[in-house]
């Protein structure tokens, strides 16, 4: 007996994707739920493979099986293939295991010939429709099956359209269509030397072969290569009855969602047209009606449709996006698929369906991509303000979010203004890699040309910037530095606003608002379910009390990273900090020398006199102006830092707060070297003398002495702390004074002091003890005991490699995955993203930007190693992550698997992380992308 | 029975260090070889511990055992303790398990009192000697045992010395010494309230107690803390007969080496004095005679001494440095120890002793510190030139090597001149961390003050720079910028020369010479033995044919790193390279954009017109001036590079040559940003216009566009190669054209192409295939087949972590441990060494500078991982190291253990590496430090 090559839709189900392809399995599943699907059959992917294997011919018995299946369909529909009275027409479509949209071929209206055409004309009472269907068959068959150039058919059509008033397809009359058919047939004859086959069986067999052949078409092969889909899967071929919604007023067509895909509300949502085909809806000839109206126009059909749609939602356990046709009072479901929805709807639907018992809470949690939550919480334009401003133009919503700023028409200007702290929207005809330096500092990107995968769009999404791309409604004049839209001219420096979520461009500054988290009741519910499920803690990175409060509101269970140096940058503090640095640097160098001499002399008891001299010099240096000013500056900073910490401790009452001691290289606090150099050069050339020049020269010298070739790998973190221990001591004092003060007022404070950039355990050995002594001294002074920890960041590979040693001192680890990624790859993020990283990602040299998505293979290996060895040395070691990856769902999944205690992310990512952590705990993450 | 607290020298041996201390075990061992050692006994370390345990009193029976031992000694010597006729005098010395030089106490001449003094005077026929010995006993006993301040005794001595003409101890007459003794006794009585004990047993017991007590003296405790020696070891006490070489013309004293410690020649080497004590040799009263003369003056004693010294050398299996005394015709050996020797002598002695069969070849190999070989091959001053110049002054030989250059008296000047390419010797009164930037570029350091552990010395050794420190014979005037020495004034900018190996300072430029390796026959022999033993290959890093030839002469078995970019820096090529870079940068940016657009459009078949437009634009850009010039510059560089490679291939005929493709960031080839900025600013301020300004502005813009925050982590290595593939293609073509040309002439060429800085296997995937295709194409063109490999450097942690994947493509790995150390630690070497690294090493935060000595814990872990996983993926993978560590013995030991195939180091380190590799293979490395 020969192999079964053909399956009726009634014989398959959704689990047979390998054999029937995705479309075939889907339509079989739908058929088997009992809903009315136009009958048909699927030729298997095995048949396709066999077809190629035996030299491009149908496997034995394939055609007989197809004819047998066709007979079943004829019986079901009461129509007959090739019957002039009641003809059966079919579509022939491809359908591989994985969706390959537009990559393979489809032929519709197979079964039409001059005879059956008459039957259709009568049945639909629409001669024009029948002739149009026929010319479409010839065109599609000629182009797809026989490879005649499409533009040759278009050329003929254009000739007749030119004779009409509207110049549209729809303006062609029956007579014109008949002439089009004649010309098409003549073209066919001329190109191929044979006549267009009016033998319906020949039409079908050739169409099937065409679908097989398209599996190895150039487009399909390229697509599979790019998507890494195997070439030996083959495609299925689906032959399905065509139904017509234009067979009179008892016919119609429509699309509908089982729930509102914009809001998630549980009401049928969609539209339909009476006596129309699907393409009529698309062509917009008539305005469709709301689906609810069907209840009046076709009450029975409507009732059936509602029942079917409930059935489908229940069967597929998710919102369905359905296409249907009514042919002479009979409802046919053409397609159903999971409905795309907005983030807001996704949350509501998941929560509602769980509450309805359709899905479990766990499934509800798995229904969302955590990043959708991020969308929900992005700043949006205030709707009223937006309405008042009015939309100038609309382009592609290429990267979500709202941004407002002054327009800059070239990357250099954008960079200049951006670096000067201005909010800039970069506006370009299109962008290219030369513009990246401007994009890096812009708040948003607007381009006239380019699609959703254009350079601007890709880079903007990469950078997380709002972007409106391909906005053809504006005309950008890059030379004159302006654009025109809706008659309005926007010049360089004018305020504009863009909404990357909607693609809208607006003039002027539009206020943005953050959605009110508490009012997002469904989200709050969903996240409370997430909290029940997840093992991983979610903490937040926050430098200021207001951020800490925000984080807590979003559900943060602690502060994983409070960067103290941000506090130094504040305008009124910066001069104090600069003074401190300059004095510290000068005095510390002197003290260093003397201390070293002292240590050397201590080994030589015969050098008593010299010992005394050095000790005196040290005293003198300590008493010197520099040190006084250094220590004076530290003293001025102490109460400021203490106040900062008090605010954060209050906000996080009862929860742990990890404070990182000073990390960045000191020259970051000093003026720009290049500006100083230009200033000094200018003054010198102009022959200026006196105090101002001297001051500038001194500052330049100081900046130069601190300048580093590779500051990322230079004097920062604990290296800085060991070099200038005074700063760390001041910070630890401030932390514990604040902790004691706040705890004394009845709060519970849990400070955790974090030492950055440890690479060797000895760095902790020489610093941690001394700092802990200060903590104890402060608590003794204040008579208050607080629960505290001392720990370290793990952010260079060596720290991860020697985590066992480090954990003997450190009471907690926090992975600084930004720096750890930089050192593991040997990438400077600042340089890499502008110079080669985006290119690497686009060309798939890297699977993704490792600064956004944790590189689990390389960096992850170090993390796993450090967790294992750290916990071996100190059971119960608290381990978390505070790099930007803490807010990235796939990275969170890794952190869960690696056994971390928590992830710490920016406050607005806390809800995302809560959901992602729950999904990680649930194991299989289902993401609808 | 009570414990045995006392061991006669005849009862111990060298393995009893724990119990008898190092000195006690040593003297016992010597006694037991049968050589005549002044008899004595050792009180055990256990006795010392017990002494403290029971409250600072002698353990029961200790004193009795000591007296019993004393009786044995009396019998052996025929002298009696306290006997006025033939008195036995003893020394009482400390001796712990580990040597603690000068940290504990010694008392000599115990047993002298007014009665025995007379006996000694008679026996030595030297009343003055007897009185001097007595005053020394009182002084040493008073100071050491009783704690009277030493300066009080000195004060008395000074008073009498002042009355003499010579003002020296030796000028004191017998009468004066008698008065000194009276005054010393009065001082003793006054300070302690009791008389100086003339009871000889009391002298001995108190001296023993004093030695015990010194174990917990401050100096000893501090020393043990600093050296991490346990405090519970205790010290032994050695009581030994004193012998006198000044008992007439049948007495004498001397020191001798069994072989010449300067040259290694096998002849007795030393000097002696008739009728003299050891201190007389030191005091230089009389000029000692060469040891050979003893053959005439004391033939029997000499014969005995030669026989003993042979016996000792044989027993200890190494050159001995011996002290001896002849007392009335009787030879006494006082001490023998392994003789210190020069590097040259060390090599000769090891080879000779192996040839004599005294030691095995393996032991010979283990007798040298490999770095000694380095010393042998360092450039030295040409002796004639040095003699002609004359030595100006002599200081401490703080860091070896010879350097000549112009004197700079401050670090800033040194830096300025050094960066301008001048050879500079930094001269400072002393250095401190402020001077490091100047030290970094200097060829040598000279300081007036500071010892062998001073800042200058430590930093210089750290940097491998010659240094003469603490040269008090020069007077540095830092303000006037000059120094004066030997009446000569050296001003800033004058040429001087320093010999860090000898401590000599010379005026003017002295020519240096490299020793001729072939003439170092013993070294050549020793290294041939090393080659028989070692498993690890030794290759060299060489960029030029002359270096490759040198390396081969030194025994290199391949080139492990040929850096191609050095070839770009040559003066006549640099303008071509700069032109290439500027054009490459401009053209590549345009082509990049267009290629990206093309790729995007390829997915959109509906955008045919745009596709054509982009393809045309690409053609136009390719045909543009920039690209022509870019490609033109590459074409100009091709024959130059080919020629370089031909030279190296010829030099390395038959051996593998690893050529690294371009690595450094392109901006390294461009002019200095700061200079350009100052230049442009100046021109602008002066209102200059025209071509020159425009050119400068354009260059500044180009430099700025290529500038990076952290160039170490930026666009370099394979990232650069992927961005500008033209450069790599040119290089691979040059390599294979050269290889084919040289092989065609009858040589055997084994090129290995090395891709730098791989971090992700995909970087190889997108580049290696294309480059290998060029290799094959060139070989096909030339009709020559060469044996080649393609491989990669492993120099970022991620490469090591994913070595298994990378080895699937790479045919060899070479660890770039300089970069790997930078990224593993997160240190920029350029910044770290100037800012904190030396401090970290000095303060023992790091055990050593990880850029000099491989960090086996962190970096080594990555190497081991990469070797394991790389070889698992590709059995037999060739793995080597080409960082600077390849020439460091301890790092080589690690490489051996890690199973590497070879180490590659600078040519002059090849001999060092050969020996170090042999030692690693032999396992236990014995280093005499």
Image: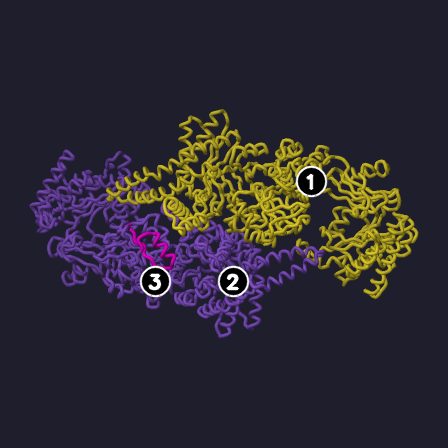
Chain colours: A yellow, B purple
**Please, what secondary structure does the residue beneath circle 1 have?**
loop
The reply to whether residue B446 is visible in this rendering is yes
For the residue carrying disc 1, how many other residues have a C-alpha within 10 Å: few (<14), some (14-19), or many (20+)? some
The percent coordinates of residue B214 (x first, y second) are 25, 40
- Which residue corresponds to mark 2? B580
Q: Chain of mark 3?
A: B
- Which residue corresponds to mark 1? A342
Front residue (pair A453, A408): A408
The reply to whether residue A332 is visible in this rendering is no
- Above or below, B515 relative to A586: below
Looking at the rendering, which quadrant does residue A907 occupy? top right
- Which residue corresponds to mark 3? B377
Which one is in front in this view, the residue at disc 3 or the one at disc 1? 1
- Which residues lie in the magenta part? B408-429
Q: Chain of mark 1?
A: A
As measured in the structure, the alpha-carbon distance from the residue carrying label 1 to the one carrying label 2 is 51 Å
**Please, what secondary structure does the residue beneath circle 2 have?**
helix
């Amino acid at each position: 007996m020969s192999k079964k090559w053909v399956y009726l839709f009634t014989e398959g189900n959704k689990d047979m994707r390998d054999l029937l392809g995705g479309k075939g399995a889907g339509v079989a599943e739908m058929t088997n739920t009992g809903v009315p699907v136009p009958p048909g059959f699927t030729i298997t992917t095995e048949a396709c493979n066999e077809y190629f294997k035996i030299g491009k011919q149908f496997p034995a018995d394939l055609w007989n099986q197809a004819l047998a299946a066709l007979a079943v369909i004829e019986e079901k529909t009461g129509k007959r293939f090739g019957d002039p009275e009641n003809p059966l027409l079919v579509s022939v479509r491809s359908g591989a295991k994985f969706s390959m949209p537009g990559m393979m071929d489809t032929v519709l209206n197979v079964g039409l010939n001059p005879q059956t055409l008459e039957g259709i004309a009568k049945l639909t009472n629409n001669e024009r429709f029948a002739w149009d269907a026929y010319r479409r068959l010839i065109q599609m068959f000629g182009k797809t099956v026989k490879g005649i150039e499409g533009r040759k058919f278009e050329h003929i059509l254009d000739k007749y359209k030119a004779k009409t008033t509207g110049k549209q397809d729809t303006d062609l009359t029956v007579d014109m269509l008949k002439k089009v058919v004649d010309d098409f047939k003549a073209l066919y004859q001329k190109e191929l030397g044979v006549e267009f086959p009016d033998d319906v069986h020949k039409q079908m067999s050739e169409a099937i072969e065409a679908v097989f052949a398209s599996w190895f078409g150039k487009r399909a092969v390229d697509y599979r290569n790019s998507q890494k889909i195997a070439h030996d899967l083959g495609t299925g071929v689906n032959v399905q009855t065509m139904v017509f919604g234009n067979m009179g007023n008892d016919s119609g067509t429509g699309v509908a969602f089982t729930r509102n895909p914009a809001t998630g509300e549980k009401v049928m949502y969609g539209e339909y047209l009476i006596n129309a085909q699907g393409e009529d809806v698309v062509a917009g000839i008539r305005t469709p009606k709301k689906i609810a109206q069907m209840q009046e126009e076709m009450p029975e059909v409507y009732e059936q449709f509602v029942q079917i749609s409930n059935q489908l939602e229940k069967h597929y356990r998710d919102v369905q996006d359905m296409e249907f046709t009514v042919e002479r009072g009979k409802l046919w479901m053409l397609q159903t698929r999971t409905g795309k929805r907005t983030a807001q709807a996704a949350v509501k639907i998941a929560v509602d369906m769980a509450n309805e018992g359709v899905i479990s809470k766990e499934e509800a949690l798995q229904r969302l991509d955590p990043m959708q939550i991020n969308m929900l919480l992005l700043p949006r334009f205030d709707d009223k303000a937006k309405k008042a401003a009015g939309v100038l133009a609309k382009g592609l919503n290429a990267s979500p979010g709202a941004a407002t700023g002054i327009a800059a028409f070239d990357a250099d200007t954008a960079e200049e203004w951006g670096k000067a702290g201005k909010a800039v929207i970069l506006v370009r005809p299109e962008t290219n890699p030369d513009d990246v330096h401007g994009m890096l500092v812009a708040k948003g990107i607007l381009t006239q040309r380019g699609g959703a995968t254009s350079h601007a769009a890709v880079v903007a999404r990469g950078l997380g910037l709002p972007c409106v791309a391909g906005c053809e409604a504006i005309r950008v004049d890059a030379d004159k530095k302006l654009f025109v839209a809706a008659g309005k001219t926007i010049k360089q420096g004018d305020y504009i606003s863009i909404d990357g979520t909607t693609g809208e461009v607006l003039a002027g500054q539009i206020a943005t608002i953050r959605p009110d988290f508490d009012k997002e009741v469904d989200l709050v519910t969903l996240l409370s379910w997430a909290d029940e499920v997840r093992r991983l803690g979610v903490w937040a990175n926050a430098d200021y009390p207001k951020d800490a409060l925000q984080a807590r509101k979003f559900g943060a269970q602690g502060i994983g990273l409070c960067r103290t140096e941000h506090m130094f940058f504040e305008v009124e503090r910066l001069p104090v900090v600069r003074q401190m640095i300059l004095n510290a640097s000068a005095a510390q160098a002197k003290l260093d020398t003397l201390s070293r001499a002292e240590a050397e002399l201590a080994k030589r008891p015969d050098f008593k006199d010299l010992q005394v001299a050095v000790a005196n010099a040290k005293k003198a240096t300590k008493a010197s102006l520099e040190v006084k000013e250094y220590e004076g500056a530290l003293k001025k900073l102490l109460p400021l830092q203490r106040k900062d910490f008090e605010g954060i401790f209050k906000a996080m009452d009862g929860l742990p707060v990890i404070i990182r001691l000073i990390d960045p290289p000191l020259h970051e606090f000093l003026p720009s070297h290049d500006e100083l150099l230009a200033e000094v050069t200018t003054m010198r050339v102009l022959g200026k003398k006196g105090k101002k020049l001297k001051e500038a020269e001194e500052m330049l010298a100081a900046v130069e002495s601190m300048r580093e070739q590779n500051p990322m790998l230079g004097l920062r973190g604990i290296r800085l702390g060991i070099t200038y221990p005074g700063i760390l001591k001041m910070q630890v004092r401030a932390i514990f004074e604040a902790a004691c003060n706040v705890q004394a007022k009845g709060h519970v404070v849990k400070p955790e002091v974090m030492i950055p950039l440890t690479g060797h355990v000895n760095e902790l050995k020489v610093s941690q003890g001394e700092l802990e002594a200060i903590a104890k001294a402060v608590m003794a002074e204040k008579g208050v005991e607080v629960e505290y920890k001392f720990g370290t960041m793990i952010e260079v590979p060596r720290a991860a490699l020697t985590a066992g040693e480090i954990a003997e001192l450190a009471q907690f680890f926090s992975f600084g995955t930004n720096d750890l990624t930089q050192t593991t790859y040997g990438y400077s993020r600042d340089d890499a993203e502008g110079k080669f990283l985006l290119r690497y990602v686009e060309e798939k040299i890297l699977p993704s930007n490792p600064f956004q998505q944790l590189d689990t293979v390389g960096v992850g290996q170090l993390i796993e190693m450090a967790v294992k060895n750290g916990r071996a040395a100190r059971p119960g070691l608290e381990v978390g992550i505070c790099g930007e990856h803490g807010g990235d769902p796939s990275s969170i999944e890794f952190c869960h698997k690696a056994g971390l205690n928590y992830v710490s992310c920016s406050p607005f990512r806390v809800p995302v992380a809560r959901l992602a952590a729950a999904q990680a705990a649930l194991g299989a993450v289902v993401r609808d992308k």
